[in-house]
Image (spheres, rainbow, N blue to C red):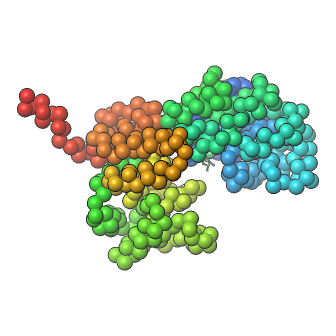
């Protein structure tokens, strides 16, 4: 190991208590320390935060971290403060701060104490803040959840489009780091273009989850019986059943309970207390199954979820990947079963019909990919990874037999035709 590698590892140990880097972290950090622009694509849970936190802590000046959600920023700031005796090492700058607090933040930055400054993109549009940041040393700008810059992402935020301008007002030579878990080539192009980082070092982790088994079944009138049967065959294992509507969540949870399955419902219509009660019951394994809308899952880290069932098909492959990604976090078995009927697609199309035309076009294009996934006869893993711009060898790749189409290939119509000829 070179001297700088020893430094990196001892800093990792000192600040975070970890003895090894995960995936591409070390390479990303080296590039950042060399002052390069970087673009980092890693799945959720891949360890993106550390890619900018560690170099920020090791470098002179303050790193600006752009993040869309105050809750996300607060968590990270608390975590960073936990690794240091200095409270001011990380700050959030936003509109909820009092004048006194803002003064303190500015003083800590000016005095070189603050290594990470978390800001929402809208705060960065304030002249007062921009002028202040022009007067201090910035190590780099990290744009987390960078897919928010793209209309093709699942969380478009127009304020992200201003970031490039603001950064060049600060200083055009400040390195910019974009980070996202969205791997579609369209979103990536948008990010690179809008952040102006065409020259960035690119770090892209694989999105393959070899331990997940992907399956699609036709959705019939017997869907509830099908789900009950599946859950009973997997009794004692933890699983999530996603439904589109709150009403269906409550109905299905009840049907499962009546049929002897221990299940709780979860959706954003319950009050906070009820939600955390049901969530804890699932996490503590008082129940096997949570029937939920997509409100369930963000930030929930149960390593041994053994199946994720979709009662209704989701609106995009990204959503499906995120939601199924909650299975098998521990590397063990994870069965991803989606029920599909074209009627559901028409329902989703109807939902979109009230939206602005541009949004509808994008929504429909994403939905058509979902249809193609559900109807394909090829390896589903290959399909998903191809969607994310990744090659997959369906014969020798890691997880090759782990989907319904590969395991039980349908009779090939083409092959039969050939024989007839
Ligand atoms: P992402 O933003 O890519 O979804 P996070 O930055 O939230 O991922 O990290 C996910 C988890 O991985 C966190 O709990 C973090 O503490 C942990 N983690 C990150 N780097 C390492 C490492 N080198 N060794 C062990 N755990 C790590
Ligand atoms: Mg993250």
Is 215 rendered above or below residue 234?
Answer: above
Observer able to see residue 228: yes
Quarter holding the N terminus? top right
| Between 191 and 280, the one nearer to me in the picture | 191
Residue 195 position within the rendered picture, expressed as x and y whole percent measured from the top left: 66, 30
Q: Residue at x 77, y 24 (%)?
A: 173
On-image quarter of the C terminus: top left
Q: Quadrant of residue 312?
A: bottom left
Q: In the image, residue 179 lies at what x, y percent?
A: 62, 37
Residue 383, quarter of picture: top left
Seen from this angle, which residue lies furthest bottom? Answer: 258
Furthest toward the left, the residue is 420
Tell me if 86 is positioned left or right of 407 in this view: right
> Can you tell which quarter of the image residue 365 is in?
top left
Position of residue 76 measured from the top left corner of the image (x, y, whole percent): 71, 50
**Residue visible at 58% across and 31% down in the picture:** 190
């Amino acid at each position: 190991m070179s001297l700088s590698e020893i430094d990196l590892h001892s800093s990792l140990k000192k600040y975070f208590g970890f003895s090894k880097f995960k995936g591409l972290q070390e390479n990303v950090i080296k590039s950042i320390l060399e002052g390069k622009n970087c673009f980092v694509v890693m799945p959720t849970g891949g360890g993106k935060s550390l890619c900018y936190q560690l170099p920020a802590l090791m470098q002179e000046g303050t790193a600006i971290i752009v993040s869309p959600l105050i809750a996300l920023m607060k968590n990270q700031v608390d975590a960073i403060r936990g690794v240091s005796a200095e409270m001011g090492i990380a700050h959030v700058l936003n509109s909820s701060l009092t004048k006194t607090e803002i003064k303190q933040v500015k003083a800590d930055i000016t005095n070189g104490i603050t290594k990470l400054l978390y800001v929402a993109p809208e705060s960065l549009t304030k002249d007062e803040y921009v002028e202040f940041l022009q007067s201090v040393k910035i190590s780099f700008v990290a744009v987390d959840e960078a897919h928010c810059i793209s209309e093709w992402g699942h969380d478009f935020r127009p304020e992200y489009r201003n970031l490039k301008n603001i950064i060049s007002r600060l200083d055009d030579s400040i390195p910019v780091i974009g980070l996202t878990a969205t791997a579609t080539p369209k979103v990536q192009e948008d990010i690179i273009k809008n952040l102006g980082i065409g020259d960035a070092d690119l770090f892209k982790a694989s999105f393959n989850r070899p331990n997940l088994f992907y399956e699609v079944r036709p959705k019939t009138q017997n869907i509830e019986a099908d789900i009950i049967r599946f859950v009973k065959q997997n009794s004692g294992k933890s699983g999530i059943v996603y439904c589109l509507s709150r009403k269906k969540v409550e109905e299905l949870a009840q049907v499962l309970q009546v049929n002897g399955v221990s299940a709780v419902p979860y959706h954003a219509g319950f009050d906070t207390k009820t939600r955390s009660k049901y969530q804890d019951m699932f996490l503590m394994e008082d129940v096997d199954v949570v029937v939920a809308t997509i409100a369930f899952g963000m930030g929930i880290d149960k390593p041994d979820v053994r199946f994720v069932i979709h009662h209704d098909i989701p609106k995009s492959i990204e959503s499906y990947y995120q939601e199924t990604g909650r299975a098998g976090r521990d590397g063990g078995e994870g069965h991803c079963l989606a029920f599909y009927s074209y009627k559901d697609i028409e329902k989703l199309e109807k939902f979109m019909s009230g939206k602005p035309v541009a949004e509808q076009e994008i929504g429909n294009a994403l939905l058509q990919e979902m249809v193609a996934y559900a109807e394909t006869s090829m390896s589903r893993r290959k399909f998903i990874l191809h969607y994310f711009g990744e090659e997959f060898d369906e014969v020798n790749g890691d997880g090759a037999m782990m989907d319904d189409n590969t395991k039980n290939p349908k009779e090939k119509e083409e092959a039969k035709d050939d024989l007839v000829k």
